[in-house]
């Protein structure tokens, strides 16, 4: 079972990256293999990310997944094939133990970061718990979320910044929050792609500003983020979820190369 220290060697940032949702085995393995080739070359600790189910959708006809067990088995196959840790979201307490059988990190979605029972259930699996900061919360309020995990007996928590609601259909990132949340004693990750979402569009499909991915990522590295979260897909325009704010996979190596150079410069 991995811990924070396994992902957090200090000399470089770590990366959580992959598709928004598991669409199929071949796609997941191809994305993982491509990213591993990049991160090995750049010496970036890597975690494959893929949601086995999307519960937070604007419309009832939106794609939610290929089936829980099928998607979780694919996440396990990524781990077994490439020897890398994996992360997925959970939404209800009963999912914690189920998902923990397949992945190394349980992620708490931003809208659910105050749900005590969910945090405790995730903590009790012994897995690392990555808590996304609610779009409606201050960075300081996240100390109570990670404390719930610690109080349940699990020292391995992480916090992910993903922007703060600004008006009705936009998000902004307050970079002061990264060092503030690091002061709680846990790694802090910048969710680059979700912070560029434009939710609640009149079409019922979330929009995004992917042209600013590099800007958000560079700023996060400059202020000292411990990790980055980036959703990526070979063809975002046909992705089944969140394609509007994902990074095209063929642009990932150039971006990460620039970010490593920035990290080296500021050190």
Image (tube, helix red, strand yellow):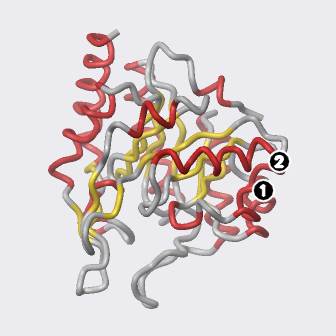
User: What secondary structure is marked by label 1?
Assistant: helix
Residue at x-position 47% and y-position 13%: 11
Residue 223 rendering spot, x and y as whole percentages? 33, 27
Q: Is residue 51 left or right of residue 239?
A: right
Please, is residue 26 above or below residue 179 in the view?
below
Q: Quadrant of residue 185?
A: top right
Q: Nearer the viewer, residue 120 or 6?
A: 120
Q: Which residue is mark 1?
A: 120
User: What secondary structure is marked by label 2?
Assistant: loop
Q: Are marks 2 and 1 in contact (CB under 8 Å)?
A: yes
Q: Is residue 29 left or right of residue 218?
A: right
Residue at x-position 35% and y-position 50%: 232
- Quadrant position of the N terminus in the picture: top right
Q: Is residue 157 left or right of residue 210?
A: right
Q: Which mark is residue 152?
A: 2
Q: Nearer the viewer, residue 47 or 191?
A: 191
Residue at x-position 59% and y-position 33%: 184
């Amino acid at each position: 079972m991995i811990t924070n220290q396994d992902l957090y060697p200090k000399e470089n940032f770590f990366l959580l990256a992959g598709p928004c949702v598991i669409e199929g085995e071949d796609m997941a393995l191809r994305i993982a293999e491509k990213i591993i080739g990049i991160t090995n070359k750049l010496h970036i600790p890597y975690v494959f990310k893929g949601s086995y189910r999307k519960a937070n959708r604007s419309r009832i006809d939106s794609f939610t997944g290929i089936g829980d067990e099928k998607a979780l088995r694919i996440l396990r196959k990524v781990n077994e094939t490439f020897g890398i840790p994996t992360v997925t979201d959970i939404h209800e307490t009963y999912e914690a133990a189920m998902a923990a059988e397949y992945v190394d990190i349980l992620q708490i979605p931003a809208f659910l970061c105050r749900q005590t029972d969910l945090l405790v259930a995730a903590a009790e699996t012994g897995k690392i718990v990555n808590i996304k900061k609610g779009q409606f919360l201050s960075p300081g309020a996240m100390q109570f979320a990670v404390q719930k995990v610690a109080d349940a007996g699990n020292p391995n928590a992480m916090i992910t910044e993903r922007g703060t609601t600004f008006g009705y259909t936009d998000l902004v990132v307050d970079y002061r929050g990264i060092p503030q949340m690091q002061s709680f004693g846990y790694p802090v990750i910048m969710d680059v792609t979700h912070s560029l979402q434009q939710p609640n569009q009149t079409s019922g499909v979330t929009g995004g500003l992917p042209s600013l991915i590099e800007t958000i990522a560079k700023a996060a590295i400059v202020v000292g983020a411990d990790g980055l979260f980036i959703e990526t897909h070979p063809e975002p325009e046909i992705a089944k979820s969140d394609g509007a704010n994902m990074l095209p996979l063929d642009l990932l190596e150039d971006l990460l190369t620039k970010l490593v150079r920035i990290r080296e410069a500021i050190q």
